[in-house]
Amino acid sequence: MHVEFRRAIIPDEVPELLAFDRKVFPKADLFDREDWMRDDSYWMLVDGAKIGCCAFQADRDFRDDLRKDGRNPPMKGSLYITTTGILPLFQSRGFGKLFKVWQITYARLHHLQSNSDELPYAEYDDHWAEPESWVSILAGDPTLLQWPY
């Protein structure tokens, strides 16, 4: 099994991101075109198939103290993870945890603190990933967009 994290091509893939969102989230939680245009978005691919997506904003406060305009204020050094979704067929298989590990690693490699930094990565136990694979990612391997190595 080969897992890859690829940056979404914006604006070309916005329609695909919107469609993906509808497969994963209830109507109240859907992103709109403006959200996908604003955020940095990444796909999670397993053997070439898009099974997950996430979006985040660098240097943006991620705490719950939203301003009146509904946006989080700038905050140097933080990474606000705005969404993470895994297709229902692939849920409960460890891909969500893997995606969070990748997001935390992305934040650390870019000297940011994510709103998922509290995830205890040592508890990642998906049966197909050997511990050596994900420990190398957390150690700052610059090839973190490819998994396994």
Image (cartoon, grey):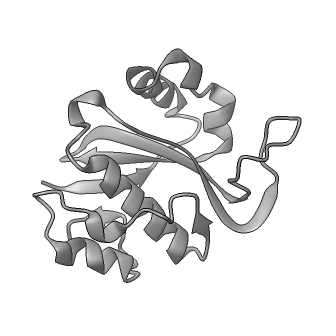
User: Is 74 on the left-hand or right-hand side of 62?
Assistant: right
Farthest residue to the bottom: give it. 139
Above or below — where is 50 with respect to 44?
A: above
How far across and down, in percent of the image, does residue 142 sit? 40, 78
Farthest residue to the top: give it. 27
How far across and down, in percent of the image, does residue 65 sit? 78, 47
Image quadrant in which you'd find residue 58: bottom right
User: Is 84 on the left-hand or right-hand side of 141?
Assistant: right
Image quadrant in which you'd find residue 87: top left
Residue visible at 44% across and 22% down? Answer: 19
> In what quadrant of the picture does the C terminus appear?
bottom left
How far across and down, in percent of the image, does residue 12 sit? 53, 34
Q: What is the count of numbered marks?
A: 0
> In what quadrant of the picture does the N terminus appear?
bottom left
Above or below — where is 40 with respect to 90?
A: below
Residue visible at 23% across and 36% down? Answer: 90
Above or below — where is 48 with respect to 116?
A: above
Above or below — where is 52 with respect to 3?
A: above
